[in-house]
Image (spheres, rainbow, N blue to C red):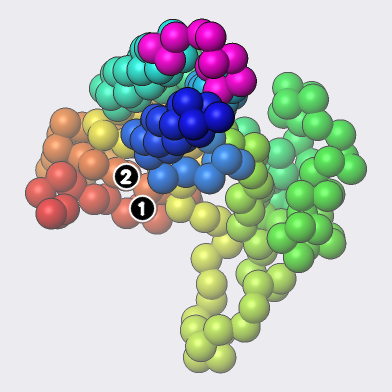
């Protein structure tokens, strides 16, 4: 009994430390690769916890290997947009200008009711009120409402017309964000033209946001601390 309790405590500490190393995401925010690692860790920890005849190291070693692999891939994905897309995928636009994008929904195997359910969870009951909605890599929906559907703010009362399109990332860590450029209707040449106007190079850019209608926000690496 005592041995079982000690093994359980050791495995609990090991699994908790492993999840901490994976970052501060909730389960619903894990990308596919992280979710697979989390499920495998749970399965590996359960076996030596139940079978006291199995050496504890046989449960801890695979967990350590999985976490090491996850950390290495995470660091590699920071420097390789292609690897990052392979591991986590890219956001997919399912609503644009109040209309469902059936081709994109088919890619995700989502029905119209699935999309409406996620809208209702965010307090939106009319698709026409949505300017754009994206299914993120973790499965959550993020949306941008049309000006007439948003809550009245001080700028509205002052007669300042709200912008009709959201700013989306088109350049991140010096690398093009393909889905962002496609959603904004921008080409790489147009993104490079923005950088030329700002007198900067891709390697100097931490984040470039744009809406395809002329608005953009540039954050250089030297602007951060």
Q: How far across and down, in percent of the image, does residue 167 sit?
A: 46, 52
Using the image as rendered, state which of residue 60 and residue 204 is in the foreground.
Answer: 60
Dot 1 crowding, Cα within 10 Å, few <14, some 14–19, many 20+ = some
Residue 49 painted magenta: yes
Q: Is residue 68 left or right of residue 121?
A: left
Q: Is disc 2 in contact with disc 1, using a CB cutoff of under 8 Å? A: yes
Q: Is residue 120 left or right of residue 9?
A: right
Q: How far across and down, in percent of the image, does residue 140 sit?
A: 64, 44
Q: How far across and down, in percent of the image, does residue 13 sit?
A: 40, 36
Q: Secondary structure at mark 1?
A: strand
The tag on residue 208 is 2
**79 vs 27: above or below:** above
* Residue at image mark 1: 216
**173 vs 215: above or below:** above
Dot 2 crowding, Cα within 10 Å, few <14, some 14–19, many 20+ = many
Farthest residue toward the right? Answer: 113
For the C terminus, the image quarter is bottom left
Residues shaded magenta: 48-57
State whether the magenta stretch is mostly helix, strand or loop.
Answer: loop
Q: Is residue 90 visible?
A: no
Q: Is residue 74 visible?
A: yes
Quarter-wise, where is residue 192 in the image?
A: top left
Point 76% across, 65% down: residue: 123
Which one is earlier in the sequence, the residue at label 2 or at label 1? 2
Using the image as rendered, state which of residue 153 and residue 70 is in the foreground.
Answer: 70
Q: How far across and down, in percent of the image, does residue 85 sit?
A: 47, 21
Farthest residue toward the front? Answer: 1
Gap in angstroms between the C-alphas marked 2 and 1: 7 Å
């Amino acid at each position: 009994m005592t041995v079982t309790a000690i093994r359980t405590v050791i495995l609990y500490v090991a699994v908790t430390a492993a999840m901490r190393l994976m970052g501060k995401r909730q389960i619903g925010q894990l990308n596919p690769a992280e979710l697979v690692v989390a499920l495998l860790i749970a399965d590996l920890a359960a076996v030596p916890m139940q079978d006291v005849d199995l050496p504890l190291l046989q449960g801890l070693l695979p967990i350590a290997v999985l976490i090491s692999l996850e950390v290495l891939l995470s660091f590699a994905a920071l420097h390789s947009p292609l690897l990052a897309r392979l591991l986590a995928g890219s956001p997919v636009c399912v609503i644009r200008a109040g209309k469902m994008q059936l081709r994109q929904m088919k890619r995700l195997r989502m029905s119209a009711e699935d999309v409406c359910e996620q809208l209702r969870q965010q307090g939106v009951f009319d698709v026409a009120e949505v300017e754009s909605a994206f299914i993120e890599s973790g499965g959550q929906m993020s949306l941008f409402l049309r000006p007439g559907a948003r809550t009245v703010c001080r700028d509205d009362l002052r007669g300042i017309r709200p912008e009709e399109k959201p700013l989306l990332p088109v350049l991140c860590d010096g690398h093009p964000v393909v889905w962002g450029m496609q959603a904004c209707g921008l080409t790489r040449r147009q993104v490079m033209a923005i950088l030329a106007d700002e007198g900067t190079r891709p390697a100097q850019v931490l984040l470039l946001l744009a809406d395809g209608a002329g608005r953009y926000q540039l954050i250089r690496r030297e602007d951060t601390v």
